[in-house]
Amino acid sequence: MPNQQELVLTADTFSRGALRMTVTLLRGINPRLALTVQNQMCSPINPQRDNNPSPKDNFKIALAPLEVRWVVESLQIKGQHPQVDPGTQMLVKALIIDWINYANLLIDSENSKNAY
């Protein structure tokens, strides 16, 4: 199990599958935000061991803190919808954790800038 510091260091790296699922979930709630997240997959892929594209491809993302907040809030709304099945709810919770970890990374980096 990775420790807290390892999670913070990799919080800005999302898999293709996580980004695609986030886009799918956001599309009906906030299409502009979904497009912003989708555009993150246009950045170069982090190096993979086998150099083959797959859902496990990782992308370093760069979103504004307010956009990250909107992603988390939109995912929470989607997860609380009464017609969402338990599997989707579990997936939404996992995505929310990933996005909150990224938000914490942004907060930590901003705090370290202000500390000097």
Image: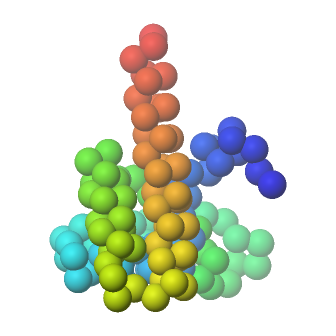
Name above or below for residue 70 compared with residue 34: above
Does the image show residue 38? no
**Residue 34 point in image, percent of width and height:** 28, 73
Residue 21 vs residue 72, the one in the foreground: 72
Name above or below for residue 72 compared with residue 42: above
- The quarter of the image holding the C terminus is top left
Residue 109 vs residue 77, the one in the foreground: 77
Q: Residue furthest right?
A: 1
Question: Would you say 75 lies left or right of 35 here?
Answer: right
Name above or below for residue 64 compared with residue 76: above
Residue 69 vs residue 51, the one in the foreground: 69
Q: Residue at x 43, y 46 (%)?
A: 103
**Residue 20 point in image, percent of width and height:** 44, 80
Does the image show residue 80? yes
Residue 49 vs residue 94, the one in the foreground: 94
Name above or below for residue 103 compared with residue 78: above
**Residue 46 point in image, percent of width and height:** 60, 64
Q: Residue at x 30, y 59 (%)?
A: 73
Question: Would you say 83 lies left or right of 2 here?
Answer: left
**Residue 98 point in image, percent of width and height:** 53, 59
Q: Residue at x 36, y 65 (%)?
A: 76
Question: Would you say 60 lies left or right of 73 here?
Answer: right
Coloring applied to the structure:
rainbow
